[in-house]
């Protein structure tokens, strides 16, 4: 019995265990639900899985199902970021168990009851429990915001190497606080119109209404909501990775104010989409620049640090030695590389779309634009996930050859898939519909193979940690005792 | 590190071997006659029906007739030759062009003006088109006579309809003809399987030859017959219309305020199965032409 309670304590009370549980939940959900689309559906595996599990897949409910699926996975991702923030950022001790406990119950309820409602018959009690779970996640966000309050004396910056404001105000903490407040407001920005105007009965996908000449407030709010939530998840990831690298110095002092301003501007811009769509876009573009620059500064800082640390013992070094030092640790290099790569497969594609909307994109049929839109934000979501995954693998204690294999397979697999998506979604730029088959074949192969590599690598990590749980004095026990020591101190 | 690079190279090589070989569809399949006549019309009676994904009741208070299949290449070639002879259309800048009266224009955001004038109907000497033009007359590329006409713009679809005294269906008319009155998701029922319609990954014989996006199938292909060992499921709409889902998107008539796009229905050979649901909409500019877009006509019943 004690063995079980100790393991449960690890999974639901230590940061490493909580993150592991949430990643495992996402991995399991992804593994099952990915069979319902793409090549696995075409091979008939999706149908077999649906029958085995007793799923009820009515054609008219497809959009509603997918929206529920997105929300359930998103809650788990938000939970992971919250766990990492409560672990990395100083706050009063009582906040951590309250925030983590609330969000854990919340995301698990959302995930379990959301999927039960969406895929296994429309039991409205489950829908209520799904909403209750989401409300708990929101409530934990409120507590996090209070815990992060940056104007408390004890959290003033003591080391002048970190970005700070008047009176030693910790600007990184302020950036986290701004992100948390913006996230809460943006959650309401989706939830309130969704409940009041949509009431869940007439669902639609944002990508299917972008060409409506006269959009309803609900349509505008939904489009804005999904964009800003993903952006804020990316901002949180940026701040978490910054802590991992101990981001500091001149670049930190430039990055943090930019990130705070960018977060505020972009959030206000998105909220303004409903009353004034055209003006809102200009504000969003401006805010985006402020949010993107800190990412570039973190990459510069982090890579320089990897090179400096990796060549410290070598005296004068040449380019090859520097490059070796940079690539020596795929987890640390990869987390930042993915931020750079994001620009090629997400940012530049998005900017091109915005700049050439009427001249190029809207000349294509709506289905092509939909492919572009869904590809765009699927890649953004997945690339954020890989960054978090690389960080978790470091925290989980991957070392030696396993660290090398895991890191490089995540980078190569995901980037292959993302490149495939980027080429696929922009295919009409360089190939006509009649001649597209070879390009479609190859890009889909790249996507499927890359994602398969990523999923298998993730599965290996999960199996490794699962096996570890069966060892009496495994890694889990050390991580739990570490967490307990922190609490007792 | 070297071993890792070698393994990755091996992986790439293995994946390279997975690509399907492209080739032309078998001639016997291309040219087959499905037994469903493209000259046939079916009557849709007046009355209410459930429209859209969320099934709002809609009333069509008149009877109308719909073509049983999309317009074929043979039919469209006949139209172009007759219209050219009559002077209804002419050749300009590599296109067949014809007059259109223009759309109301409100200068709405993203709206482009479709003014009165000559607009393109069908491209000449285009490798994606199944019609050829020798300077005098149009002919169908051999084998494609019974396939739906493609690479036809909305203006070209309207031109055909006007020429013969028909019209393009409104979205309401199209959807009622596709699903009847019981709120079904596909013309034949609630679910889709590969042998119901031509869509991406449906496994039809054309996909075996040219890859997943396949090719158009002859009109009326999914009528329960077996072709070259490939058994189809008879999949008409409740009113006996074929190809209302898959094969080619079909232009509809509506001109929407504030937008210059024209809407298409039905999904095509290049779309996933869920895009074949009867309420799914696609749209494009009215001068857009594609190997996956065709049309069919309706006519008002006078007695």
Image (cartoon, rainbow, N blue to C red):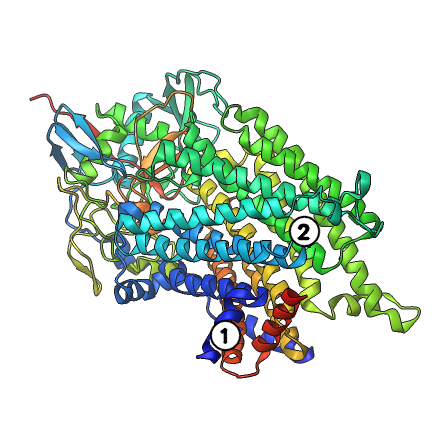
User: Any mark on residue A134, and which?
Assistant: none
Respond whether the residues carrying marks 1 and 2 are from the same subunit.
yes
Q: Which residue is mark 1?
A: A7
Identify whether A77 is placed above or below A23: above
Secondary element under disc 2, as helix, strand or loop, is helix
Residue A35 quadrant: bottom left
Secondary element under disc 1, as helix, strand or loop, is helix
Q: Is residue A289 left or right of residue A95?
A: right
Would you call the spot at circle 1 few (<14 residues within 10 Å), some (14-19), or many (20 or more)? some
Residue at 18% from the left image edge and 48% from the top image edge: B189
Q: Position of residue A179 (x, y in %)?
A: 62, 43
**Mark 1 or 2, closer to the camera:** 1
Q: Which residue is mark 2?
A: A239
Could you tell which of marks 1 and 2 lies nearer the N-terminus?
1
Q: Position of residue B221 (x, y in %)?
A: 21, 51
A106 or B43, which is in the foreground? A106
Q: Does the rendering let one see residue A434? A: no
Q: Does the rendering let one see residue B163? A: yes
Q: Position of residue A303 (x, y in %)?
A: 77, 59
Which quadrant, please, contains the N terminus of chain A?
Answer: bottom left
A294 or A112, which is in the foreground? A112
């Amino acid at each position: 019995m004690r063995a079980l309670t100790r393991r449960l304590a690890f999974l639901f009370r230590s940061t490493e265990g909580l993150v592991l549980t949430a990643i495992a939940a996402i991995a399991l959900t992804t593994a099952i639900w990915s069979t319902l689309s793409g090549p696995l559906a075409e091979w008939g595996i999706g149908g077999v899985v649906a029958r085995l599990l007793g799923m009820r897949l009515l054609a008219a409910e497809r959009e509603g199902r997918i929206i529920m699926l997105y929300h359930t996975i998103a809650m788990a991702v938000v939970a992971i970021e919250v766990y990492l923030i409560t672990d990395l950022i100083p706050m009063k001790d009582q906040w951590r168990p309250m925030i983590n406990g609330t969000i854990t119950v919340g995301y698990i309820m959302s995930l379990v009851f959301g999927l039960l409602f969406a895929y296994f018959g429309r039991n409205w009690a489950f829908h209520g429990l799904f909403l209750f779970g989401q409300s708990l996640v929101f409530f934990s966000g409120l507590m996090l915001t209070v815990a992060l309050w940056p104007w408390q004396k004890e959290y003033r910056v003591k080391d002048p190497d970190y970005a700070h404001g008047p009176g030693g105000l910790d600007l990184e903490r302020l950036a986290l606080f701004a992100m948390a407040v913006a996230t809460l407001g943006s959650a309401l920005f989706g939830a309130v119109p969704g409940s009041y105007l949509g009431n869940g009965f007439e669902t639609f996908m944002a990508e299917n209404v972008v060409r409506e000449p006269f959009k309803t407030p609900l349509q505008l709010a939904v489009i804005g909501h999904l964009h800003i939530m993903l952006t804020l998840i990316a901002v949180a990831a940026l701040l978490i990775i910054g802590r991992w690298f101990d981001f500091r110095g001149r670049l930190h002092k430039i990055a943090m104010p930019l990130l705070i301003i960018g977060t505020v501007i972009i959030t206000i811009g998105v909220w303004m989409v409903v009353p004034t769509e055209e003006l809102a876009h200009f504000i969003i573009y401006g805010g985006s620049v402020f949010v993107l620059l800190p990412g570039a500064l973190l990459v510069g800082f982090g890579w320089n640090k990897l090179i400096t640390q990796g060549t410290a013992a070598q005296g004068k070094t040449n380019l090859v030695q520097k490059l070796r030092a940079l690539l020596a640790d795929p987890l640390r290099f990869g987390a930042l590389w993915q931020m750079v790569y994001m620009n090629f497969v997400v940012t530049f594609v998005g900017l091109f779309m915005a700049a050439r909307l009427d001249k190029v994109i809207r000349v294509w049929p709506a289905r092509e634009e939909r492919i572009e839109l869904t590809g765009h934000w699927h890649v953004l979501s997945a690339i954020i996930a890989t960054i978090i995954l690389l960080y978790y693998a470091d925290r989980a204690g991957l070392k030696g050859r396993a660290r090398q294999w895991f890191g490089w397979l995540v980078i190569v697999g995901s980037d292959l898939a993302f490149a495939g998506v980027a080429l696929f979604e922009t295919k009409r730029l360089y190939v006509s519909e009649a001649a597209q088959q070879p390009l479609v074949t190859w890009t889909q192969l790249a996507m499927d193979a890359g994602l398969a590599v990523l999923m298998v690598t993730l599965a290996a990590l999960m199996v490794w940690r699962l096996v570890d749980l069966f060892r009496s004095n495994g890694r889990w026990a050390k991580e739990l005792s570490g967490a307990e020591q922190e609490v007792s101190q | 590190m070297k071993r890792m690079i070698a393994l990755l190279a091996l992986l790439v090589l293995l994946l390279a071997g997975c690509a399907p070989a492209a080739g032309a569809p078998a001639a016997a399949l291309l040219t087959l006659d499905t037994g469903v006549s493209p000259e046939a019309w079916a009557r849709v009676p007046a009355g209410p029906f459930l429209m859209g994904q969320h099934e709002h009741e809609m009333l069509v208070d008149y009877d109308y007739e719909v073509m049983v299949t999309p317009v074929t290449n043979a039919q469209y070639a006949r139209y172009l030759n007759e219209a050219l002879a009559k002077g209804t259309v002419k050749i300009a800048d590599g296109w067949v062009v014809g007059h259109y009266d223009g759309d109301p224009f409100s200068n709405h955001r993203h709206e482009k003006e479709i003014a009165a004038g000559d607009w393109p109907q069908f491209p000449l000497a285009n490798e994606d088109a199944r019609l050829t033009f020798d300077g005098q007359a149009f002919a169908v590329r051999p084998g494609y006579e019974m396939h739906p006409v493609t690479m036809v713009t909305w203006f070209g679809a309207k031109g055909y309809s006007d020429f013969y005294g028909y019209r393009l269906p409104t979205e309401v008319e199209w959807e009622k003809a596709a699903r009847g009155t019981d709120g079904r998701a596909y013309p034949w029922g609630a679910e889709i399987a590969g042998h119901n319609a031509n869509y991406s990954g449906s496994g039809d014989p054309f996909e075996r030859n040219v890859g997943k996006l396949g090719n158009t199938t002859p009109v009326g292909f999914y009528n329960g017959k077996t072709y070259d060992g490939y058994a189809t499921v008879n999949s008409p709409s409740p009113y006996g219309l074929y190809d209302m889902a898959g094969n080619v998107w079909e232009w509809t008539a509506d001109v929407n305020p504030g937008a210059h796009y024209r809407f298409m229905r039905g999904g095509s050979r290049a779309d996933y199965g869920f895009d074949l649901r009867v309420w799914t909409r696609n749209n494009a500019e009215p001068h857009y032409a594609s190997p996956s877009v065709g049309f069919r006509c309706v006519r008002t019943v006078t007695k």
